[in-house]
Amino acid sequence: MIKIYGMPTCRYCSYIEEQVKGDERFKVIDIGENVRNMGKFMRLRDTSKAFDHAKEIGDIGIPAFVLEDGTVTLKPEDVGLKEYQPDEGAATCGIDGKGC
């Protein structure tokens, strides 16, 4: 099963969640739902090189995908999903609150 870490308030995560609804190959984990989920995500983010670029540019790094073999990726296409394409000029949210 592929784990997807995200939050419903993230438009990128919501777009991914819509694609996997009812697909038992995926498990969506809401990192804001409880502190255990957030803790698991933070340990993953703190230890996986997959998040290096996201951290450099001030992004949280969600949605994040953990494959069955433990591989971590932030690219939906790596797990057979489509990436959200915001409208041209639409703002995106950064960890600093800019663009929200």
Image (cartoon, grey):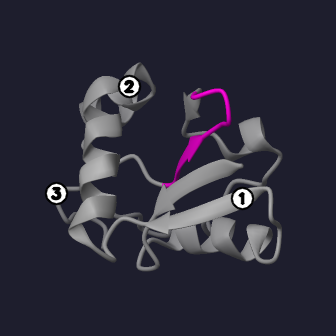
Q: Residue at x 31, y 72 (%)?
A: 32
Q: Is disc 1 placed on a helix, strand or loop?
A: strand
Residue 19, image x, y percentages? 78, 69
Characterize the local packing of mark 3: few (<14), some (14-19) or many (20 or more) Cα atoms within 10 angstroms.
Answer: few
Does residue 59 appear anywhere in the picture? no
* Marks 1 and 3, how far apart at CA: 30 Å
Disc 2: which residue = 48
Does residue 62 appear anywhere in the picture? yes
Which residues are drawn in magenta? 63-70
Tell which tag, 3 or 2, sits nearer the viewer. 2
| Relative side of 34 to 91, left or right | left
Q: Is disc 2 placed on a helix, strand or loop?
A: loop
Residue 20, image x, y percentages? 76, 68
Disc 1: which residue = 26
Q: Is disc 3 placed on a helix, strand or loop?
A: loop
66 in relation to 40, above or below: above
Q: Main secondary structure of the magenta part?
A: loop
Characterize the local packing of mark 2: few (<14), some (14-19) or many (20 or more) Cα atoms within 10 angstroms.
Answer: few
Residue closer to the observer: 22 or 92: 22
Q: Earlier in the sequence, mark 3 or mark 2?
A: 2
Tell which tag, 1 or 3, sits nearer the viewer. 1
